[in-house]
Image (tube, rainbow, N blue to C red):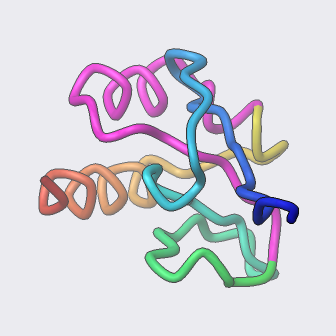
Amino acid sequence: MTTAYIPLRTCLACGLKTRKDYLIRLVKGRSAEVVLDPTGKLPGRGAYLCHKEDCKEIGLKKNKLDRHLKARISQENKMRITEELTQIH
């Protein structure tokens, strides 16, 4: 009997590899706007952050998210993402 495949993803800030449902997914959609993806099913290029506060800050402040998504993220978009991330515990 085979076991079910569990997809692993990597936190772009700390490099932690874990199940994708334990990470926060951010997606660059067609409009080049970056949004949180709570379902993990939105189309577009995705990046993952773990729930540690340090990782949330590092991902946005050191432009790691910009590099990973291959996009320039506006300051307004970063501020909105930061607000949404603080609401997630």
| Residue located at (21% from left, 29% from top) | 53
Return the residue found at the far front.
Answer: 1
Does 16 appear above or below 44? above
Where is residue 43 drawn, in percent x and y? 79, 82
Q: Is residue 60 magenta?
A: yes
| Residue located at (43% from left, 47% from top) | 75
| Residue located at (67% from left, 83% from top) | 41
Relative horizontal placement of residue 68, taking residue 41 as reference (left or right): right
Does 67 appear above or below 87? above
| Count of numbered marks | 0
Q: Is residue 47 magenta?
A: yes
**Magenta highlight range:** 44-67
Q: Nearer the viewer, residue 7 or 47?
A: 7
Relative horizontal placement of residue 3, taking residue 2 as reference (left or right): left
Q: Nearer the viewer, residue 6 or 2?
A: 2
Where is residue 39 drawn, in percent x and y? 52, 82
Where is residue 81 drawn, in percent x and y? 36, 57
Does 82 appear above or below 4? above
Q: Nearer the viewer, residue 39 or 55?
A: 39
Q: Quadrant of residue 20?
A: bottom right
Relative horizontal placement of residue 71, taking residue 48 as reference (left or right): right
Quarter of the image where the N terminus is located: bottom right
Q: Nearer the viewer, residue 83 or 55?
A: 55
| Residue located at (39% from left, 58% from top) | 76
Where is residue 8 drawn, in percent x and y? 70, 44
Relative horizontal placement of residue 36, taking residue 48 as reference (left or right): left
